Image (tube, rainbow, N blue to C red):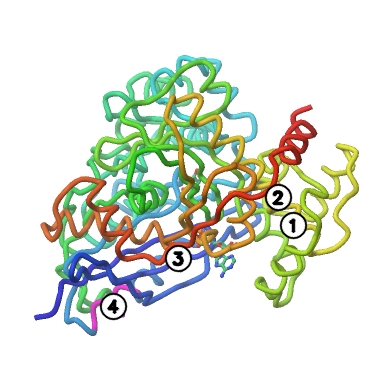
Amino acid sequence: TGPAVHAAVDLGASSGRVITGRLEGGRLHTEEVARFPNGPVPVPARGRDTLYWDILSLYSGVLEGLRRAAEPHGGLASVGIDSWAVDYGLLDGDAALLGNPVHYRDARTAGSPERVFEHLPAAEMYAVNGLQVQPFNTVFQLAAASEGGRLAALDGDLLLIPDLLGFWLTGERVAELTNASTTGLVDVDARAWADACLDVLEGPFGVPARRLLPGLVEPGTVVGPLLRRDAVGAAAGAPLVAVGSHDTASAVVAVPAATPNFAYVSSGTWSLVGVELDAPVRTEESRAANFTNELGVDGTVRYLRNVMGLWVLQECLRVWGGEVDLAALLERAAAVPALSCVVDVDDPRFLPPGDMPARIREFAAQTGQEPPADEAATTRCVLDSLALAYRRAVRQASELSGRRVDVVHVVGGGANNALLCRLTADAVGLPVVAGPAEGAAVGNLLVQARAVGEVRGGLADLRRIVADSTVTRRYEPSGPAAPWQAAERLLRG
Ligand code: ADP
Ligand code: LRH
């Protein structure tokens, strides 16, 4: 028999993919066997457009991908699923899905954090969950969804997206910890559900949280065998491993760093920028900077900041329509003078889907800048602005945590954007190492392989495998820091 083949299901906000991996001679060989589009679907509901995920189409893509992955090998050694964070499906007492999962960019959470903080002040909540405040954290989504007592009588399950798909595949209900840590409902010290947060949902908001939430499992737990040969073909019987089911947790596993002195940019629809720590940082400065302590594989803490990411560019491309050639556009953007116009990409106006080029022009006008004149200049503005945001986040992560940073690792689709990587090196003033571009899938595969006993060791060992298996590209910083400092001053006033 050949080497064991594992399959990673990696659902990003812009596409889902199924990637197989096999270990041979200390290297991981990967192959993409399926890719399907993903994105917000607006549907009229409650007098406005509500944004949903098309979960059944994603599930179909997963099934087909697993069939394709398993077929040539007559089976799979294991399967793991990771996805974007915070979103969930609700099941009733008969395990029937109650509606389509709502997309985290939906407007229903406007004002929800403030309503929750009336019952558990933000500082007290941060002391427990260590989590950044994003309006879409699951706790705020549930508070919003509970309006009118809508969830009070619910007697079923709340499952985060990878756990929901895992339930459909295996019949087992779990809450994998790395993803659960993004809900706002986990105690970051105890790595357990947080009573203080559950009490708020159950009391004032009438959400029966304790009834709905399944037991937590650490990444690396074998959940159970895949059922349904009719749906998954030869993948039936393969063990589903709860990997770092938060895509960012899996991506951080795949950072090919040789020492602990690194920062990472997990660069996809979002850019998640930070460092890996052994323990959370919950100082007042950290809370004010909206740094988050999300839980990682092997007891680690992902201390990071959300930067709006390539989402802004994705939405520009959507608005420009047609078949925009990204490579050609990036080439033209590279020729635009640096830092002609910058925006604060983390401004909330860039969160919902919409006309990003218009929002960029509006931001430029409000800050006394000449708005970008065309598509190339707009693209350059987005990339300069992202690099500027990375500069701030890397510096803050290092200062707030005390972790020295010598190198910035970029993993995820953004590792393929050479211009952005070069600008990041210039802005941060540190070398950038780019790759792997399918970081989440690689981290997913390695945690599976370890769970089924095919590799041993800690994160350093897994990272050595990544380094030995990946062609990375290195970008050295060039040019002075002064223009970046000036752009920073322009945005921060
Ligand atoms: P997600 O997991 O959030 O769906 P990905 O990690 O797949 O995101 O990254 C998608 C992004 O990566 C795209 O929006 C695009 O900007 C960037 N990207 C992917 N491939 C390339 C490429 N060849 N050149 C430039 N950018 C790329
Ligand atoms: C990236 C990501 C990120 C979350 C966001 C909702 O895909 O998981 O870590 O903050 O989606």
Cβ atoms at labels 4 and 1 below 8 Å apart:
no
Q: Amino acid at mark 1?
A: Arg
Which residue: 49% across, 46% down? Answer: 408
Tell me if label 1 and label 2 are in contact, CB under 8 Å. yes
- Separation (CA) of disc 2 from disc 3: 28 Å
Q: Is there CB contact under 8 Å for labels 3 and 1?
A: no
> Which region of the structure is painted magenta?
65-71
Left or right: residue 105 compared with residue 226: right
Report which quarter residue 294 is drawn in: top left
Does the magenta segment cover residue 461?
no
- In the rendered structure, find residue 103 and report the number of the disc placed on it: none
For marks 4 and 1, the one nearer the N-term is: 4
Q: Earlier in the sequence, mark 2 or mark 3?
A: 3
- Cα separation between marks 3 and 1: 27 Å
Real-space Cα separation, disc 4 to disc 1, in angstroms: 41 Å
The amino acid on which the numbered mark 3 sits, given as a three-letter code, is: Gly
Q: Which mark is residue 380?
A: 1
Residue under the point 39% across and 61% down: 10
Query: Which one is earlier in the sequence, the residue at label 4 or at label 2?
Result: 4
Q: Which residue is mark 4?
A: 67
Left/right of residue 489 with respect to residue 428 in the rendered view? right
Mark linked to residue 16: 3
The residue indicated by pointer 2 is: 384
Q: In the image, is 256 to the left or to the right of 482?
A: left
Residue 190, position as x, y percentages in the image: 26, 25
